[in-house]
């Protein structure tokens, strides 16, 4: 389906009008559809204001949305357990996002790469600077 998975913070930066993020997403969308993990949709909707509703939903509806099925849920649990055994705390939403990227073999775009201490996870290397 899509080659890239967008973290919630990338979605939020785009929706807030961060030009460099919007430019990057526009460029990547020319290569193919962009996707999100279902939990990212939940996070963005939970934080949107009423006046942002129409534009936010229009944007989210334009993205492929990867479901939280059994294989993603199991992989997320394994990531959390493995991280815990190394003394690292991995939040459930981040584990679900990482598991989605790994399960569907996607490259994750995030501004919080420290939230994803998972060696096998492919992160987009050239995120624009936040100013």
Image: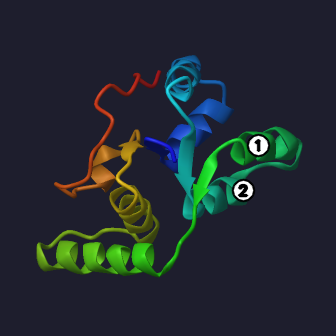
Q: Which residue is mark 2?
A: 45
**Above/below status of 64 relative to 94:** above
37, 81: nearer the viewer: 37
Image mark for residue 96: none
Q: Which residue sits at x=28%, y=31%?
A: 125
Q: Which residue sits at x=65%, y=53%?
A: 44
Is the image coloured rainbow, by chain, by secondary structure, or in one colour?
rainbow
Where is residue 7? Give x, y as percent: 48, 48
**Above/below status of 95 relative to 101:** below
Residue 11, image quadrant: top right
Q: Which residue sits at x=60%, y=40%?
A: 12
Dot placed on the residue nearer the N-terminal end, 1 or 2: 2
- Callout 1: helix, strand or loop? helix
**Above/below status of 128 relative to 86:** above
Query: 10 Å neighbourhood of mark 1: few (<14), some, or many (≥20)?
Result: some
Q: Which residue sits at x=32%, y=25%?
A: 126
Q: Is residue 31 left or right of residue 26?
A: left
Residue 88, image quadrant: bottom left
- Callout 2: helix, strand or loop? helix
Q: Which residue is mark 1?
A: 56
Residue 87, image quadrant: bottom left
Where is residue 114? Give x, y as percent: 27, 49
Query: 10 Å neighbourhood of mark 2: few (<14), some, or many (≥20)?
Result: some
Q: Is residue 61 left or right of residue 40?
A: right
Where is residue 36? Give x, y as percent: 55, 51
Q: Residue furthest left?
A: 86
Q: Is residue 108 left or right of residue 30?
A: left
Where is residue 89? Give x, y as percent: 27, 70
> Is disc 1 in contact with disc 2, using a CB cutoff of under 8 Å?
yes
Q: Is residue 95 left or right of residue 56?
A: left
Tally of numbered tags? 2
């Amino acid at each position: 389906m899509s080659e890239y998975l967008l973290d919630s913070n990338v979605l939020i930066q785009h929706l807030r009008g961060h030009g460099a993020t919007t430019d990057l997403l526009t460029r990547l969308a020319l290569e193919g559809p962009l996707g999100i993990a279902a939990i990212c949709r939940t996070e963005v909707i939970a934080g949107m204001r009423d006046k942002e509703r129409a534009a936010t939903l229009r944007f989210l509806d334009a993205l492929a949305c990867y479901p939280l099925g059994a294989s993603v849920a199991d992989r997320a649990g394994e990531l959390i357990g493995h991280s815990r055994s190394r003394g690292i705390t991995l939040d459930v939403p981040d584990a679900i996002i990482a598991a989605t990227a790994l399960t569907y073999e996607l490259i994750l775009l995030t501004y919080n790469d420290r939230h994803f201490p998972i060696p096998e996870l492919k992160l987009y290397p050239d995120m624009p600077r936040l100013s």
